[in-house]
């Protein structure tokens, strides 16, 4: 008799976005005349930058001729892309990262979800609350938690992100081994300063812990004082893995390309306390379970780093940031307190009532879809998240409707 992995049974039954989709579908059925504006899910809405599309097309043409056709590529990614990433995203910012420390993949979701496989099942895990749900669920699946009770899984250390700490959690009171951090943050839109990241790096060094730093929204940083990468912090090469994605900067959510940086100094420990570099372990995992991102997609991603690609990506991100600004100003004028919007595509709004109640109210009175904060964790209760990923026109219409509904 085949037994299942019972840890899966601990997972909370419905995934946040499918719950939202069900409520929206029910609303649309009841109000077919209403044109619902979606500011909920964090998917981009604008086309790929022209530089990426052109590179994509030429790479597809290469695949159409025997002499330039490519079959399986290197699992870690083609050197042309890894070198461009290392030079532009890290070395240009004074962060010492080399091409062979970069692993190209088909998504930061997969990488942030898969990385935990390298570590022991009894590793003590610290996870922010509220949080991008993938970090949490993949640790539940792996058996690192107890049951779910009172809004939380037993056995995890939750890092509360609240109004009081401006949504940047404090260091844990107890020792932990693996720490998930995400800045600019999804869902709160908060950012971390160099000093704040330094305190986490120092903590990790002291406790022989490792930081998993998700920088999927790095391109939205406009404040020059903020770090774009954790490797801008001294000592981070020894204690941090960083995740990046082309999804939100260049609109690759449907095209799929991302990467993970594993510096060669990053260590975990075997049962005798001996140092084990993480780089070869991730390399082994990647090569065993993944067969590389397609050649045309990697060429399209490489084009992000061309001069025209850089300008187009900046414009694209600027377009969404303008929406974020419009949302923030409308919400602020209505008297609601919020975080995010500068340096982030998310606006995290304190609704002063149950998150799902606020969600239903916005849907029913304004025909606008948000994401209830409670879906991101216990500390998200009372909040909603609005996303800037939509057209200027839709954001404008949504703000007019929200103003009418909330005034
Ligand atoms: N990390 C965070 C914090 C995200 O919000 C998302 C997507 O919304 C991802 C990772 C996923 O990125 P990708 O599209 O590269 O899988």
Image (cartoon, rainbow, N blue to C red):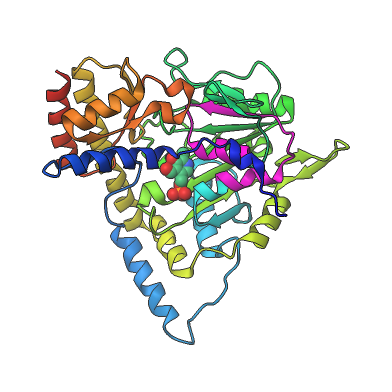
In the drawing, does residue 119 fall left or right of residue 201? right
Which image quadrant for residue 61? bottom left
Q: Nearer the viewer, residue 165 or 377?
A: 377
Side (left or right) of 357 relative to 265: left
Residue 159 percent location from the top left of the image = 56, 22
At 60% from the left and 67% from the top, the residue drawn is 74
**Viewed as shown, does residue 175 lie left or right of 354?**
right
Q: Quadrant of ligand 1?
A: top left
Q: Establish if 8 lies above or below 291.
A: above
> Any magenta on residue 229?
no
Magenta stretch containing residue 120, yes or no? yes
Q: Is residue 303 left or right of residue 244?
A: left
Residue 381 in percent (x, y) is at 41, 21
Q: Residue at x 67, y 61 (%)?
A: 288
Residue occupying image coordinates x 60% and y 44%: 96
Q: Is residue 342 among what the camera can see?
A: no
In the picture, residue 385 is in which quadrant?
top left
Residue 398 sits above or below residue 301 on the image: above
* Along the line of sight, the residue nearer the viewer: 341 or 3: 3
Give me the residue at 32% from left, 64% from top: 53
Q: Report the span colored magenta.
A: 112-140
Where is residue 316 drawn, in percent x and y?
28, 48
């Amino acid at each position: 008799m085949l037994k299942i992995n019972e840890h899966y049974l601990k997972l909370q039954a419905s995934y946040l976005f499918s719950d939202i989709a069900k409520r929206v579908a029910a609303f649309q059925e009841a109000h077919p005349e209403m044109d619902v504006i979606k500011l909920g899910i964090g998917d981009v809405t604008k086309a790929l930058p022209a530089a990426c599309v052109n590179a994509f097309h030429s790479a597809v043409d290469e695949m159409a001729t025997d002499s330039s056709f490519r079959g399986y590529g290197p699992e870690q990614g083609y050197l042309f892309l890894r070198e461009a990433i290392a030079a532009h995203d890290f070395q240009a910012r004074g962060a010492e990262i080399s091409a062979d420390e970069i692993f190209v993949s088909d998504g930061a979701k997969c990488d942030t979800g898969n990385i935990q496989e390298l570590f022991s099942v009894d590793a003590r895990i610290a996870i922010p609350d509220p949080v991008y749900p993938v970090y949490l669920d993949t640790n539940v699946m792996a058996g690192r938690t107890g049951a779910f009770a009172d809004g939380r899984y037993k056995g995890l250390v939750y890092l509360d992100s609240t109004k009081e700490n401006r949504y940047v959690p404090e260091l844990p009171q107890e020792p932990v081994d693996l720490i998930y951090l995400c800045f600019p943050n999804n869902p709160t839109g908060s950012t971390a300063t160099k000093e704040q990241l330094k305190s986490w790096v120092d903590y990790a060094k002291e406790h022989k812990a490792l930081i998993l730093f998700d920088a999927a929204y790095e391109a939205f940083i406009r404040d020059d004082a903020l770090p774009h990468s954790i490797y801008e912090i001294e000592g981070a090469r020894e204690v941090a893995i960083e995740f990046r994605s082309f999804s939100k900067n260049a609109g690759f959510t449907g095209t799929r390309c991302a990467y993970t940086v594993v510096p060669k100094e990053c260590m975990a420990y075997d049962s005798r306390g001996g140092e084990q570099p993480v780089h070869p372990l991730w390399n082994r995992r990647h090569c065993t379970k993944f067969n590389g991102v397609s050649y045309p997609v990697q060429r399209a991603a490489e084009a992000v780093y061309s001069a025209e690609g850089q300008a187009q990506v900046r414009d694209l991100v600027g377009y969404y940031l303008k929406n974020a600004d419009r949302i923030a100003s409308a919400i602020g004028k209505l008297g609601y307190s919020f975080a995010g919007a500068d340096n982030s595509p998310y606006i995290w709004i304190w609704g002063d009532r149950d998150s799902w109640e606020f969600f239903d109210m916005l849907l029913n009175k304004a025909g606008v879809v948000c994401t209830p904060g409670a879906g991101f964790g216990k500390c998200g209760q009372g909040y909603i998240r609005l996303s800037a990923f939509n057209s200027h026109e839709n954001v404008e219409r949504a703000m007019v409707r929200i103003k009418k509904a909330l005034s």
